[in-house]
Amino acid sequence: MAHSFRNLTTALLAFSCWLVLAAAERVANVEFNVFALHPIEGLTYTPAARQGKKELQFFATSRSENYSYRGKPRLEFFDRDDPSKQPVAVWEIPEEMKRATLIFSPKERNEDKVTKYSIIAVDDSMTRIPAGHFAVLNLSSTEYVGIQGKEKMKVAPGLNPAVVGKRKVYIGFALPGAEKNLLSGYQFENAPNQRVLLIIFPPAKKTSLQPVVRRLVEDGVAKAETETP
């Protein structure tokens, strides 16, 4: 009996060691684009081992170019002017995520007046938002109702299901039960070769109910791309 117990203990220890080694050896290989409600300057990252730092470029009303990263599943971002050389934002990359939109928000400033950021990572895969579709990412804690023509859709906090777009889309946002009182409206194009992410930020003023909306679009997406397994 004691011998069997020792064998079981040895097997469990070996399996635990294997899990630790497997986690340590995992290599993330992802593409990502970045966005911030207020563009950020001077953020850098290292795309891969033995490569120099690359500076990210943020835009006020659109998504950035696509960046690539290969390395440990912990992507660190740095402020090029920070003498401490410590990361100002960190993304722990989920194993299943291969393509993402990273939304940066200021979190705090240290004694050197260097801003640190929190990151919200959104699945930007072709299967999550196919060509000719749009999805609404609600970053507020408020649930809204999206109104497109005669159709209504629930806009819960977080990333909502993708919706087939049209050449010209007009979507209004209202509170549940008060659909006749639109808080804001947003008009945009969603061509068959475009993927659109609408981001709802909390109202700019505490006394306002009107959300801040931004549209991130990727052009030139072939339908066949979205159908690739």
Image (tube, grey):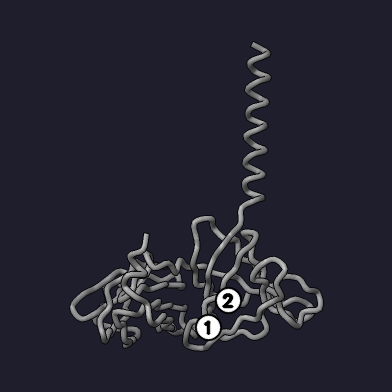
Which secondary structure lies at badge 2? strand
The quarter in which the N terminus is drawn is top right
At a point 24% along the width and 73% down the height, the residue shown is: 152
Instruction: Say which quarter of the image contains residue 182.
Output: bottom left
> CA separation, marks 2 and 1?
8 Å
- Closer to the chain start, of discs 2 and 1, is 1
Mark 1 burial class by Cα count in 10 Å: few <14, some 14-19, many 20+: some
Viewer-nearest residue: 44 or 171: 44
| Residue at numbered disc 1 | 37
Residue most extreme to the right: 83
Residue 63 horizontal/vertical position (percent): 48, 82
Where's residue 138, x and y in %?
A: 42, 72
Q: Residue furthest top?
A: 1
Residue neighbourhood size for the residue with mark 2, other residues' Cα within 10 Å, grouped as few (<14), some (14–19), many (≥20): some
Asked whether disc 2 touches disc 1, contact meaning CB atoms under 8 Å apart, the reply is: yes
**Place of residue 146 in the rendered image (x, y in percent of width and height, measured from the top left):** 30, 76
Q: Position of residue 160 (x, y in %)?
A: 36, 67
Q: Which residue occupies 31% across, 86% down?
A: 189
Residue drawn at 65 percent across, 59 percent down: 72
- Badge 2 is on which residue? 105
